[in-house]
Each structure stands twice: as structure tokens, then as C-alpha cells.
Amino acid sequence: MNILVRLPNWLGDLVMSSAFVGALHKAYPDARIDVITKKGIDDIARLIPNVQNVFPFSKHTDKGIRGAYYFGKQLRANNYDLFFSLPDSTSASIMGLGTKSKKRIGYNKEVRKLFLTDSYKKPKGLHRAEEYVKLLELHTKQSFDTEVKLNTPTEDPAAGLPIEYIAVNFNSEAQSRRMPIDKAQSILQSLLQKTDLSIVLIGGPDDANHVNAILKDIDSDRVKSVAGKTSLVELINILANAEVVLTTDSGPAHLANSLGTHTIVLFGAGDESNTAPYNAVNKTIIRAKDIECAPCLSNTCKLGTPICLTQIEETLIVNTIKTVCKS
């Protein structure tokens, strides 16, 4: 049997979809599982266990509904028996139509039902990883465990890192989830004063300016920035080898959690019951108390500065890190 899965577009959602692929392998242990993913995060998809082939898709190259259809059409020769659409978009279901897979399966949001052979009502109140697995359960009428997991790359981590360190991510694509500069500086100063830990600040190319602004008033040889200087594979190795990861609600939180590194997530605008890193055994959620507008789920804070983040106590962060590093 040949199976094709259209994976989600966002990094965190892509990581959580590894639970679906794991369940899919249990449902069809002899099947070949191929995936379609957004170009730029395809290296992450290659780390999902049981994936054979990864087909990167670019909205800039294959534009609109027509581009999605013709991208799927290019894969017809693989003769897929099943196509699963994890994104809820119409274009994802049309991509499946282009493949001429015998069965095309997904949730019936918007007009997708017209392009799917088997569609189901999306359940409410589930974690995102459980939503993905539930789609398979509805189709197969079986139950599966939900486990979010990535393989660790075989390449060595980026050079020049301390032997033992905490990886820190203050970034997010959403302004409401990005740690303000002065608060980030205050957290770093507390870590430097109250622990002996080395600190490695991470981030992508778009995060480098934010990280550099944070470091402007931080003078310590125990702090190193690799923001904008690593590939995704190098970043994963940095997260996998860290003593602990301190991060905002963002893609790196899901990466670290899926690799087995204890992940401390500073939550504000997001809803942890739906989008927090899934694996509970190596996860700690920290949220400020008594913030009436949180979680707002908005990508932009209506107050300008997200007080749901600025009011998280540094002492709580430091004590949590100390506890995790001792365990």
C-alpha cells in the first residue's frame, strides 16, 4: 500500500503531526508513507520516523488552487491508495485530488468535502496532536496512542558551544508570543546572577535583530547567540544536546519536546490545552496569574506589550530551571 500525507505548514504543527505518522505506521505497518510539506521545513519532515519520501511544496512556485492541483498531479505515478490532508485548507484537499489517490481523507471544513472521498467532522476540545490522530481513528475505526517524536540528526551540533548549556528562545512569529526586549534582558540577568549555567540564545535569520537587541546590554562570556547562524538540522542538535530549553510558545518548543529535552514554555496569548508541546513527561508550562485577557489567541497584542509575558516572575523561571537541572 502507498500512502501520501499532506503535512501542516507551520513548524510546530509539523512536529505535532509526527504523532499522526506514527499512528499511521501502526495502522498500516507494511505501507510506504510519503509526505508533502512546505519548502523550508522539509528537513524537519525527514526526521519524522517511518517517512520514506518528502516532497517539498512552495506556494511561490505552485501558486493558488491551480498550482496545488498540478503539484499533486506530478505525484500520480506513485499510485497512492490513501491521501490524508492534515491542513484544513481547500488547496490541500485539491492537491489530493490532483494525485488521483483512491481515497482522499480529511476533516470537512469549508468546501473540502467536494474534493475528499472520506470526510469527517473535526472534534472540539482536543490537543492539536490528538486532532491529527483522531482523523486516522475516525477513518480506520481503531484507537492509537499519541506520541510526538522526531529522530535526532546524525550530524554533529554547531561548533563552539559550551559542554553544558541551557538553550533559550525568546522569539515567535507572533508579536503576542515574542518576549519583549526588556523582559528578556531581565530574565537573562536573573539566570546569570542566580545560576552557573551557560546560555545559548537561538533563533532563525528573521530573529537575529531581536536577539541582538536583547544582548545589547548583556555583558557576560556565559551567553552566546547562534540566532541566524544555524541550519534547522543544527538547531535541532542544539536543542537535543541542551540541559533544558527555555522558550516562548513557538516552533522550537515543539522541536525540543519531541526530541526528549525538558522544555519550559512561557505561555501568554496561546492556549496550552490545544497548542502546547504534547509530551508531558519532559514539559513544564509557566503562565502569569490573573491576566484577564489571556489567553487571547491573537497574534498581535491589543495592549501593545504582552503583559501576559512581562508579568511572568523571573524567580519562578529560575527555580523551575534549577529543579529540572537537578533531576
Image (cartoon, rainbow, N blue to C red):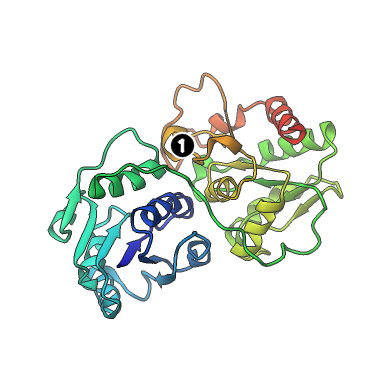
Q: Residue 33 appears at what percent x and percent y? A: 38, 65
- Which image quarter holds the N terminus? bottom left
- Tally of numbered tags: 1
Which residue matches tag 1?
A: 270
Residue nearest the viewer, comparing 23 with 54 = 23
Q: Residue 249 appears at what percent x and percent y? A: 53, 41
From the viewer's perspective, is residue 247 above or below residue 151? above
**Secondary element at tag 1:** loop
The residue sitting at the left extreme is: 114
* Residue in the image at 73% along x and 63% along y: 158
From the viewer's perspective, is residue 277 above or below residue 190? below
* Residue in the image at 16% along x and 61% along y: 115
Is residue 101 left or right of 297 when viewed as pictured? left
- Which image quarter holds the C terminus? top right
Residue nearest the viewer, comparing 147 with 313 = 147
Is residue 152 left or right of 217 when viewed as pictured? left
Could you say which quadrant of the image residue 35 lies in?
A: bottom left
From the viewer's perspective, is residue 55 above or below residue 131? below
Residue nearest the viewer, comparing 311 with 164 = 164
